Image (spheres, rainbow, N blue to C red):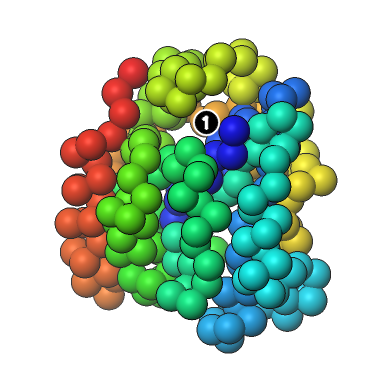
Amino acid sequence: MRIAMWSGPRNLSTAMMYAFGARQDFTVMDEPFYGAYLAVTGSDHPMKAEIIDAHETDPERIAETCMQEGAPHTYMKHMPHHMLPDFPLGWAEDCVNIHLIRHPARVIASYAAKREAPTLEDIGFVQQAALYERLGGIVIDSTDIRANPGAMLRALCNSVDLPFDPAMLEWPAGPRAEDGIWAKHWYNAVHKSTGIAGAEGPLPEVPEGLRPVLNAALPHYSGLHRVRLSP
């Protein structure tokens, strides 16, 4: 089985990668198209030069890697906005595609704490909705996962005919060998964790200057939220 987990940033995506990585039957990949995305777009991301230097930037070679089988399964953490129009996507057609979503107000608040003034492009909701339309798959909301990790991970495994493994609920603190080089900027909180964080509180207040981004993202989030997996 090859799982392609599509998620925007600041969306429990690294914790989910750690959960699958805690299983003995999965190898994991961390945002394999990130370097290629930065090399093509020149987007001013933290650690851009280091990422481009340390990671593969040829999208065709990356696609070939994404088609390889794991031991025996592979879990790939992908960002929808990394998949530029000219990048190959055929490799994903034979994957189990899962779309991890989170309310855009939470995404924007978390992203802005790490990189000032995120744009709609940065948080990936438009691209994620388009990928769901093309590839189909399962939608799961990070708020539901945090409210009841055991039930939601069990439901997710059941939905893809994968036995649930309790190892997914706990892992040792610290970085992982599979982490992208960007982990030292983005993964501080998850490196301190030993499992999925608890239930989230009320939605954060989004600054007025970022409300146009919130309003543009909400319809795409809402459409996916309506078809999300329930425990």
Where is residue 121 drawn, in percent x and y? 38, 72
Q: Is residue 208 visible?
A: no
Q: Quadrant of residue 229?
A: top left
Residue pictured at 75% horizontal, 23% vertical: 24
Residue pictured at 27% horizontal, 69% vertical: 213
Quadrant in which the C terminus is drawn: top left
Quadrant in which the N terminus is drawn: top right
Q: Quadrant of residue 85?
A: bottom left
Q: Is residue 80 visible?
A: yes
Please determine whether, in this image, residue 204 is positioned above or below residue 171. below
The amino acid beneath tag 1 is: Ala
178 and 67: which is toward the camera: 67
Residue 21 in the figure: left or right of residue 139: right
Please determine whether, in this image, residue 173 is positioned above or below residue 9. above
Residue pictured at 62% horizontal, 22% vertical: 168
118 and 138: which is toward the camera: 138
Residue 80 in the figure: left or right of residue 65: left
Please determine whether, in this image, residue 185 is positioned above or below residue 192. below
Where is residue 88 drawn, in percent x and y? 53, 67
Residue pictured at 44% horizontal, 18% vertical: 158
Q: Residues within 10 Å of mark 1 (few under 14, many from 20)?
A: some
Number of marks in the image? 1
Please determine whether, in this image, residue 222 is positioned above or below residue 147. below
Residue 222 in the figure: left or right of residue 22: left
Where is residue 181 drawn, in percent x and y? 75, 61
Where is residue 131 drawn, in percent x and y? 36, 57
Residue on which the image places disc 1: 197
Residue 125 in the figure: left or right of residue 153: left
Callout 1: helix, strand or loop? loop
